[in-house]
Image: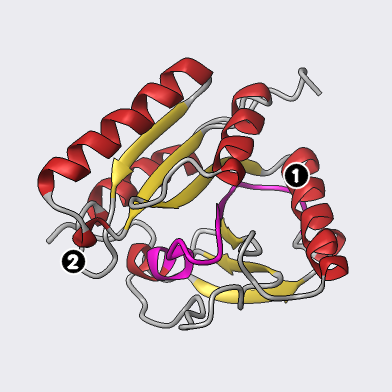
Amino acid sequence: MPSNPLHGASFVLSTPDPHKLPADSGAEIAFAGRSNAGKSSALNALVGVHGLARTSRTPGRTQHLVVFVLPDGRRLVDLPGYGYAKVPEAVRAQWREALEHYLARRRSLRALALVMDIRHPLTPFDQQMLVFCAAHALPCHVLLTKADKLGRGQIAQTLLAVQRELTQLGGVLSAQVFSATAGTGVETARGALTKLLGGSPRELAAR
């Protein structure tokens, strides 16, 4: 089994305020997705530590920006789950504001890992995030999670449809099949995200 380049991640902090994040230097990748897409499970599978990112049978428990640091100082940031949690609209508005502030202004952000349930991909939230990434030259790697829930034919058809959508949007957008439960695509995702973490910062001139 190949070594895990994301091994050794450890919790740093959890905050609803993007201004309280670690210094905006170095490199980090953020994980975004709807609250029921399996985002925390995907992150746990990638770092190889069960329970590092909190999972719950009640979607929407990730309500802060949660930062994990790798041994070399690079970071993984678990963003608030969106669109499902049963919380007051005022709280959801706060989440949106924090998310938008982070994505638009965080200079150490190298890429976004966008988690979609393969059974329900390209929701309005997903499409909004993809459009943002394409417009701001932010690389985005899509993880089509819960692939163990579908047959091979459905998996292939869905992956092709998502890849076509990404091609139409332009930008540095890619997608793969993933299952935290079955381990499908875990090594591929580790390689893709590690490569993005080591890349040069995105162009900010468009802002």
What mark, if any, has residue 182 been given in the picture? 2
Disc 1 target residue: 106
What mark, if any, has residue 201 been given in the picture? none
Query: Does dot 2 land on a helix, a strand or a loop?
Result: loop
Real-space CA distance between mark 2 and mark 1, rounded to the nearest whole angstrom: 33 Å
Query: Residue 181 placed where, x, y %?
Result: 24, 70
Q: Is residue 68 visible?
A: yes
Asked whether 44 or 4 is in front, the reply is 44
Residue at point 54%, 75% (across, down): 59
Q: Nearer the viewer, mark 2 or mark 1?
A: 2
In this picture, residue 186 sits left or right of residue 164: left
In this picture, residue 18 sits left or right of residue 188: right
Vertical position of residue 168 compared to residue 24: above or below: above
Q: Quadrant of the C terminus?
A: top right
In this picture, residue 52 sits left or right of residue 188: right
Residue at point 21%, 44% (across, down): 155
Asked whether residue 28 is drawn in magenta, I would say yes
Give the quadrant of residue 74: bottom right
Categorize mark 2 by other alpha carbons within 10 Å: few (<14), some (14-19), many (20+).
few
> Which stretch appears magenta?
23-43
Asked whether 190 or 180 is in front, the reply is 180
Kind of residue at badge 1: Arg
- CB contact under 8 Å: marks 2 and 1: no
Vertical position of residue 79 compared to residue 174: above or below: below
Query: Does dot 1 land on a helix, a strand or a loop?
Result: loop
Vertical position of residue 58 compared to residue 62: above or below: below
Counting residues from the start of the chain, the first of labels 2 and 1 encountered is 1
Kind of residue at badge 2: Ala
Asked whether residue 156 is drawn in magenta, I would say no
Query: Residue 16 placed where, x, y %?
Result: 79, 69
